[in-house]
Image: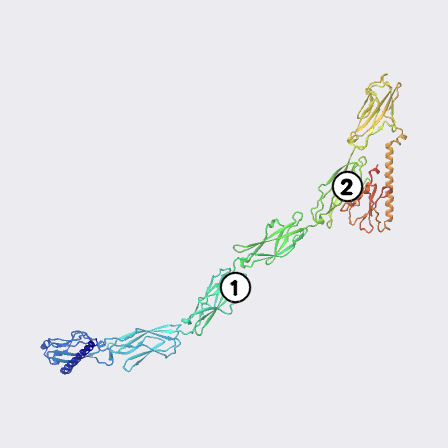
């Protein structure tokens, strides 16, 4: 392998040596150089010269001798016409292509003319003369310069110069710059004649006014006619942070509805900075003048400047916000600007009106005057405008005796507009209704309860205007006659009633001796036994008085009607007879039929049916002889007497009343007949002296005497007590005495103890045959009640008058 490489090297060396020998032989045969001059760019076929003539060759022999020219840069620019020997242009010649270097203004094209038979070599130099066929041309059509706006006038900036392939006068002669207030050019020549141009700043730049300057640089050559080339010079003014950000406005005014949802865009700030790059990048932030509370309500995007709602906004809490924002650029020495945002909160109707009771009288007397203020009410609404305007009213106002009167701004007085009556309405639930003027309106209610206090404005009222009480005679003392209950619609003390009998005299007897009433419940009692035959009716008044201040009262008429009881047997008063004796009647035997034999007259102290007398034969000797009229008691002959009839007839007549059970009396009549005629009167008169000693008259005399004696004793006792009134300071309490601890203005005969002790004592002592009396203590602290034996013939006394509470029915006639 190494031997092959070595042999190849030796072969190449031999060939190089042979080449050198041939070249030296050719140079030795060449003649002097022939020069021609032609302008570039001449047309193909143009004759340069007669080469044959110039070289001393025959033109006709050129073809035979095989003349040829060298190729230059692989191109055959020239050729020889073998017939004429002329040298002509075979291909257009471009001087700039052949001689790109501009070290000299001349350009020669050297070639060899080779004649092979015999071999001769001629040297030809063809000078290519320049023509202005090329315009100046900049290496870059767009020249970009970055110049800081802080550059000072006079500062120079190199520009890329233009080139012109032509030389000499056809090359670049000068430069021109388009009109500019900020720039000019300065042309300088190099050692090789090349023209250089500098851009000179003649005035300060302001990027914010003009960030880019578009200039046209023109290069002009010296040819005829001159040619030119242009380049765009783009001067980009580099920013310096010489401009602070600027807000659109220094003060923004924004309306925001309250309760706006979180995230609502309030405002997007736009601060512009005339600088660029980081000098124009703006950041937004709150300044120290923005309160923390405001920052809690609104968020600020530092990059976009968006201000959004961050928390709920309540108009009633804050009516507006002042937001101070700073815009700062990102320059090395940052500049900033500030603005103020006035946020005005728009109210919506989101607050209910409120009712506040400032003062209130929950208790009021029913006799309060019309126009009296019972409550002061204030209304408020935290909203504003129409949303905060409220109207206060009373629900069902026409049905209530109250009215509202506006006393001041948002203050109302609740007043009485009609008289009150607790007995009709004792409690009022007053519903105050407030509504605002918003849309939709909001409302609220407040209910206050008013209690109407009772005043004593109603007198007691009995259910009847009068009472008729029927009482059967011979009643038990202390019997309940009736309950006289009055009604008083007032309350408490005004409703608590006390009953008493209005004092009067009935048949010279105080009514309090006859009747008593329980002061607490109006139960009316009879204090004594009544006898219809002596007392048929009592008329008096009972008064009911309440405990109000002042007390009110009313009275009712009470009529006690004594009903008869069959308690009296008939008394036969005619024919008169001594007690237990038999009446003897003598009639003529010749008496006619229907003749009056005797007339029986019986009297009954009872009344009505109890006093209606009927007569019957209880026993008769001969029932066919006599007749008896059952109504008038006439005994008449039923037939004439005969001699067979006994001379003496025994008739027992019974007089019977119509009571239940009936009472009766009998009389025995012995009828004797005689022959002579004796005149009898219809009735037999009784001698006066015998009338005085009949049983009936005797009873009447005893009763009248007893009453007269008791009346005399009562008068004496009253006189004695009147005389002792001034000297007596206190009445001693007896064993059967009790003192009332309760003051009263009720009549003396009224029982006033709440536990009915007086009445019980009265009944107990009366049954024992005693008389219960009562008299006031001298100091007025109460009453002194005593019971004394009836035999002492004393009755109780009072400060004003004495009153016998009870008398035994046996003492009455």
Provide the residue designation for mark 2.
525
Mark linked to residue 262: none
- Please state if 4 lies on the left or on the right of 779 as rendered: left
Q: For the residue labelled by badge 2, is the local secondary structure a helix, a strand or a loop? A: strand
Q: In this view, does 354 lie above or below 679?
A: below
Residue 592: x and y in percent read 84, 19
Q: For the residue labelled by badge 1, is the local secondary structure a helix, a strand or a loop? A: strand
Provide the residue designation for mark 1.
320
- Please state if 428 lies on the left or on the right of 218 as rendered: right
Can the viewer see residue 690? yes
In the image, farthest residue toward the right: 689
Query: Which one is in front in this view, the residue at disc 2 or the one at disc 1?
Result: 2
Q: In this view, does 650 lie above or below 661?
A: above
Crowd tier of the residue under label 2, counting other residues whose Cα lies within 10 Å: few below 14, some 14–19, many 20 or above: some
- Please state if 372 lies on the left or on the right of 98 as rendered: right
Q: How is the image coloured?
A: rainbow
Q: Earlier in the sequence, mark 2 or mark 1?
A: 1
Residue 155: x and y in percent read 36, 79
Quadrant in the picture for the C terminus? top right
In the image, farthest residue toward the top: 643
Crowd tier of the residue under label 1, counting other residues whose Cα lies within 10 Å: few below 14, some 14–19, many 20 or above: some
Q: Is residue 540 above or below residue 40?
A: above
Q: Nearer the viewer, residue 760 or 310?
A: 760
Can the viewer see residue 276? no
Quadrant in the picture for the N terminus? bottom left
Residue 143: x and y in percent read 32, 74
Q: In this view, does 131 lie above or below 262?
A: below
Q: Nearer the viewer, residue 773 or 40?
A: 773
């Amino acid at each position: 392998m190494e031997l092959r490489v070595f042999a190849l090297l030796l072969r190449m060396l031999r060939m190089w040596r042979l080449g050198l020998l041939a070249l030296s032989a050719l140079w030795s045969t060449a003649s002097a150089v022939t020069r021609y001059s032609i302008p570039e760019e001449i047309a193909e076929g143009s004759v340069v010269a007669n080469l044959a003539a110039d070289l001393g060759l025959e033109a006709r022999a050129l073809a035979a001798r095989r003349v040829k020219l060298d190729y230059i840069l692989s191109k055959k620019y020239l050729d020889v016409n073998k017939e004429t020997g002329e040298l002509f242009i075979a291909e257009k010649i471009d001087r700039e292509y052949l001689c790109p270097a501009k070290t000299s203004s001349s350009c020669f094209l050297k070639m060899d003319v080779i004649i092979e038979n015999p071999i001769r070599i001629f040297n030809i130099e063809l000078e290519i003369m320049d023509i202005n066929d090329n315009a100046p041309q900049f290496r870059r059509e767009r020249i970009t310069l970055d110049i800081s706006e802080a550059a000072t006038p006079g500062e120079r900036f190199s520009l890329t110069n233009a080139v012109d392939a032509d030389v000499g006068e056809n090359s670049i002669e000068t430069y021109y710059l388009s009109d500019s207030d900020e720039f000019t050019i300065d042309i300088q020549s190099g050692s090789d004649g090349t023209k250089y141009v500098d851009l000179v700043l003649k005035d300060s730049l302001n990027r914010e006014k003009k960030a880019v300057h578009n200039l046209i640089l023109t290069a002009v050559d010296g040819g005829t006619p001159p040619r030119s080339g242009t380049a765009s010079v783009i001067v980009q003014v580099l920013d310096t942070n010489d401009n602070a950000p600027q807000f659109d406005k220094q003060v923004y005014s924004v309306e925001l509805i309250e309760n706006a949802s979180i995230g609502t865009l309030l405002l997007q700030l736009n601060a512009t900075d005339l600088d660029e790059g980081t000098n124009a990048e703006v950041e937004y932030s709150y300044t120290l003048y923005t309160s923390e509370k405001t920052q809690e309500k609104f968020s600020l995007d530092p990059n976009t400047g968006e201000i959004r709602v961050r928390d709920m906004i309540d108009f009633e809490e804050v009516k507006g916000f002042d937001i101070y924002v700073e815009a700062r650029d990102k320059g090395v020495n940052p500049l900033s600007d500030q603005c103020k945002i006035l946020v005005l909160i728009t109210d919506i109707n989101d607050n209910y009106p409120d009712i506040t009771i400032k003062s209130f009288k929950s208790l009021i007397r029913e006799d309060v005057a019309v126009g009296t203020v019972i409550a002061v009410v204030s209304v408020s609404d935290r909203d504003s405008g129409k949303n905060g305007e409220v109207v206060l009213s009373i629900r069902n106002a026409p049905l209530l005796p109250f009215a509202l009167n506006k006393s001041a701004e948002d203050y109302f007085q609740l007043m009485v507009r009609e008289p009150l009556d607790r007995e009709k309405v004792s409690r009022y639930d007053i519903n105050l209704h407030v509504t605002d003027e918003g849309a939709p309106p909001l409302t609220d209610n407040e209910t206050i309860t008013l209690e109407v206090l009772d005043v004593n404005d109603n007198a007691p009222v009995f259910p009847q205007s009068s009472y008729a009480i029927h009482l059967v005679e011979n009643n038990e003392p202390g019997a309940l006659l009736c309950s006289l209950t009055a009604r008083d619609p007032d309350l408490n003390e005004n409703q608590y009633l006390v009953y008493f009998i209005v004092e009067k005299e009935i048949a010279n007897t105080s009514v309090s001796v006859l009747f008593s009433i329980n002061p607490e419940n109006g139960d009316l009692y009879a204090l004594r036994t009544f006898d219809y035959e002596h007392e048929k009716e009592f008329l008096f008044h009972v008064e009911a008085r309440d405990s109000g201040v002042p007390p009110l009262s009313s009275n009712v008429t009470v009529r006690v009607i004594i009903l008869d009881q069959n308690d009296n047997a008939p008394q036969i008063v005619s024919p008169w007879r001594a007690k237990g004796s038999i009446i003897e009647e003598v009639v003529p035997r010749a008496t006619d039929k229907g003749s009056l034999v005797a007339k029986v007259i019986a009297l009954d102290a009872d009344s009505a049916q109890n006093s209606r007398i009927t007569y019957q034969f209880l026993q008769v000797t001969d029932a066919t002889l006599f007749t008896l009229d059952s109504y008038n008691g006439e005994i008449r002959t039923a037939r004439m007497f005969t001699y067979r009839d006994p001379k003496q007839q025994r008739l027992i007549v019974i007089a019977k009343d119509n009571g239940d059970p009936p009472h009766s009396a009998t009389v025995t009549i012995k009828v004797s007949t005689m022959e002579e005629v004796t005149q009898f009167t219809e009735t037999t008169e009784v001698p006066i002296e015998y009338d005085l000693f009949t049983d009936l008259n005797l009873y009447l005399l005893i009763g009248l005497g007893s009453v007269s004696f008791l009346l005399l004793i009562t008068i004496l006792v009253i006189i004695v007590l009147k005389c002792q009134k001034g000297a007596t300071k206190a009445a001693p309490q007896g064993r059967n005495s009790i003192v009332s601890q309760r003051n009263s203005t009720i009549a003396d005969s009224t029982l006033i103890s709440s536990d009915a002790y007086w009445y019980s004592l009265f009944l107990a002592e009366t049954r024992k045959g005693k008389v219960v009396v009562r008299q006031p203590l001298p100091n007025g602290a109460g009453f002194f009640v005593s019971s004394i034996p009836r035999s002492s013939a004393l009755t109780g006394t009072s400060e004003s008058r004495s009153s016998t509470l009870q008398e035994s029915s046996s003492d009455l006639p």
